[in-house]
Image: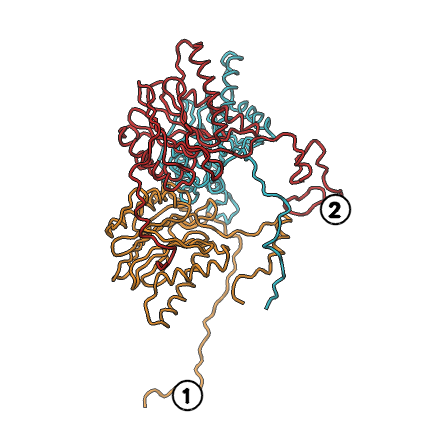
Amino acid sequence: MNATVASEYSAERHSVPIEHRFNPYSDNGGTVLGIAGEDFAVLAGDTRQVVGYSINTRYEPRVFDVGDNIVMTANGFDADGAALIDRFRNSLKWYKFDHNGKRLSILSAARYIQHLLYGKRFFPYYVSTLIAGLDDEGRGAVYSYDPVGSYEREQCRAGGAAASLIMPFLDNQVNFKNQYVPGSDGKKKKELRYLSLEEVIQLVRDAFTSATERHIYVGDGLEILIVTKEGVRTEYFPLKRD
Amino acid sequence: MNHDPYVWGRPDDAVYGAYNHAIANASSHGNVQEETSFPKMNSQQPIITGTSVNSIKFKDGVIVAADNMGSYGSLLRFNNIERIFKVGKETVVGVSGDISDFQQIQRLLDELEITEEIYDNDGGHNLRAPNVHEYLTRVLYNRRSKMDPLWNAVVVAGFNDDKTPFLRYVDLLGVTYGLSAICTGFGAHLAIPLLRQLVPDDKDYQNVTEEQAREAIINCMKVLFYRDARSSDKFTLVTLKQGQPPKFEKDLRCENQNWRFAKDLVGYGSTQL
Amino acid sequence: MPGLSFDNYQRNQFLAAKGFGTPRATSTGTTIVGCKFAGGVVIAADTRATAGSIVADKNCEKLHRLAPQIWCAGAGTAADTEMVTQLIASNLELHSLSQNRKPRVITALTMLKQHLFKYQGHLGAYLIVAGVDPTGAHLMSVQAHGSTDIGHYQSLGSGSLAAMAVLETHWKPNMTKEEAVQLCAQAIELGIWNDLGSGSNVDVCVMEVGKDAELYRNYKTPNVRESKTRSYKFPRGTTAVLKERSWQVVDEQVVATGEPMEVDA
C-alpha cells in the first residue's frame, strides 16, 4: 500500500492573491471564412453572437461591405471588431475626400489595415481579420491577419471559433492538399484549378453546417458576401439553432 | 536559456538573474510590494448594483421593465431606485449594473439632450434611439479602452427614423447587439428563453400585440423575483408607442405569486422531521 | 486501497507552480429537469455532451437507471455521473436483495449523498433522482458536495435557468402524466435553444406508481442535420499508397494423429 505523503493541502495558502480585475476582452464566438476564386471572392460568417454559454442574438451581421468592392470582417471580440471596421470605413471616406474620390485598391487596403492593427500592438484588437475583393487584375483576393497585423494574401482562410475545424477541410477541398492523381502512387499531386462560384458556395455551406454540428459557438444563420466585378451581393442560409 | 516549454527561449533566471521589472515600468506580475504602490486605481468592481433590465418589442412599440432595488453585495440597500429614464422625446434607457456609473450615464445623456435638442443645431433633426445608442456605445467602449469601465449593461429602446421600433444593447466592454427581446444580467438567463418563445425570429415582433408583450414581461418579472436573489417584486414598467410620449408605470408589484407549494415540502430528503 | 489517492497532490502543486497545469476532466454542459404528477414522476434531459466548446457527443444518454423504477438524470463531469450512478445502482440492487424489498428512492438518495459528501465535491456529479417505490413517487436532487433538495419540480445543469423559467411559468399542482411529460420536454427544449451547453434531442423517462418505468429515448428530435450540398467521395487511389507489405498467411494443415474417437457404440 502506498503511504500517503502528509501534505497540508487544506490549510495551504496560495502565494499569489486571487486576482479580480477588469478584463477588457470577451469572446463573442462566431466563425468566418473567405475563399478567392478566379474572378470573384466570397467572405462568409455565421450570425450568432455569444458570450459564455448564452446566445446574445441569433442575427448580428458579422461581415460588412466597406465600400470600393471590398468586404471585411473582424471576428473575435465584437466591440474591437466593430471599432476596427468603423475606423477603416472612416479612413476610406477621408481617403476619398482627400484624393478626389479615388478607388482604394485591395492591396493598399490590406496594408492600411496592417497599420490599424499594429497601431494597437500592446493593447491589441482581439480579432482575426479577413478582407476579400478583387485585385488590380480582377482576380479574387483574400487577405488574412493575426490580431496585431501580420498578414498574407491567400486562396482561402477560416477565422474565429471553428477555424481549426474548417481550415483542414479547406486545405483538402480548395487547395487539394493530400489528394493525388489516382494511379500515380502519390507521385503526382492533384492539379490545382479554380473553383466555380457555385462550388465555392457549396463548400462554404457544408463547412458551416459541419462546424455548427460540432462547435457550440457556431450556428443560427450563415451570411455570405460575394464580390464580383458587378459588385457585392449577399446570400443568407439558416443554420441550426441549438 | 530557459527550456520550460511555457517560457521557452527566454533568458534563464539561474544564469542571468530575475528580470528587472523597474525597467520601462513593466508590470510586476504579482510582486506585492510594487502593487501596493500602484500609481492609479480605476473601478475594478461594481459597488451598489441593480439587477436585470427586461425588454421586448411589439407591433408598434417597445416595453421595458426593471425592478427598483439597489443591492450592496447581498444587502438590500435601496428599494427606490428608478433605473429606466427618458432621453429626448421618445427614447428610454434602462441600466443595470453599478448605480453610481448609471447616474454618471444619466448625467451624460442629460447633457446630450440639452446640446442636441435644446440648442437645436441640426435643423430640427430629433435625437432618436439609434443616436443615443451609438453615443453610449462610444462612451462605454472608450472607457473600457482606458481600463476604467462604466460597470453597466444598458438597453436603449425607442424608434428608428422610419418609425419602426428600435431595441439595442451595449455593455461595459462596448459589445452591442440588437434583437426583438433583450434582457441584461440574470434576465439574460431566465427571462430571455421565455421572451424568445414569443419572438423566435427578429421580425416576429410584428405579430406581437401590446397585451401579449406586457403579459410576457410581467411574467418575466415574477419568474426573476422567484429565482434572482438580487431582485425585488416592485418594479417600473415603461411602454413606448409610436407617436406618444413614453408611459411610465411606477411601483408595480408582481401579482399572483404562488408560495402554496411550500406547505407540502418538508426537510431536504426523507419526509420525517 | 479504496477511494481517491492524493499521493500526487504535492507533485501536482509543484508542477502547476512551474506552469504545467493539471489535466481537467470534461464537464458536460447540460439541461436536466424533473417534475411530479398525480401518481408518478417524470425526468428529462438533453443529449449534448461537450468538451470545452467542442461537441463531443451529439446524442449521449444522461438518464441513468439506478433501479428498475428509480432513474436519475446527471449533469456535471460525465465520468463522475456515470460511475457514481453505476456504483449506487449495484449497491442498491445488493441492498434490495439482502432486504428482500424493492429499493426506495430515499435509500438511493442517501447512498448518493453520503458517497458524494465523502469526496468533498471532487466528484462533479449533480443528479436529479426520481422514482416510485412502495411509499409513492419521489423527486429529489443531489449536488456534488452532498447537499440534497426536494421539490415538485427540479432543474440542474448549465441550462437549468432556461428550464426553470418554463417550470416556474407553467407548473401547477396535480398535473396529468401527459401534462408533466409535455412540461419537462418543453423545459429541456428551452435549454437546448437558449443554452450553448445543451443541444440535440430530448430524452424522457416516466415512472408511474404500480407500472414499469418507461424510457422514451429521443422523445423529441428537433435538431436533425440537413443533408450536405456536395458529395465528398474520393476516387479510389486519391490517397497515395506509400508502402506495401504483405504476408503469406498459410492455413495450418491439421494432421490427424491417433485413432479416431469412437462415436457410435
Up-down: is C80 above or below B36? below
Per the image, the residue denoted by label 1 is C259
In the rendered image, residue B168, in percent from the top left (x then y), is placed at 40, 27
Look at the image and give the colour of chain B: red
Mark 1 is on which residue type?
A: Glu
Colour pattern of the rendering: by chain
Q: Mark 1 lies on which chain?
A: C
Label 1 – label 2 distance at C-alpha: 82 Å
Helix, strand or loop under label 1: loop
Of C213 and C100, which appears nearest the observer? C100
Helix, strand or loop under label 2: helix
| Left or right, A58 with reference to A189 | left
In the rendered image, residue B203, in percent from the top left (x then y), is placed at 32, 29
In the rendered image, residue B33, in percent from the top left (x then y), is placed at 69, 38
Up-down: is A241 above or below C73? above
Q: Can residue C201 be seen in this view?
A: yes
Q: Which residue lies furthest to the bottom in this view?
A: C265
Mark 2 is on which residue type?
A: Ala
Per the image, the residue denoted by label 2 is B14
Of B157 and A135, which appears nearest the observer? B157
Q: Is residue A191 visible?
A: no
Look at the image and give the colour of chain A: cyan
Label 1 vs label 2, nearer the camera: 2
Label 1: few (<14), some or many (≥20) within 10 Å? few
| Left or right, C178 with reference to B3 | left
| Left or right, C166 with reference to B151 | left
Q: The orange chain is which one?
A: C
Q: Mark 2 lies on which chain?
A: B
Q: Count all numbered tags in the image, as a single digit.
A: 2
Label 2: few (<14), some or many (≥20) within 10 Å? few
Co-location on one chain, circles 1 and 2? no
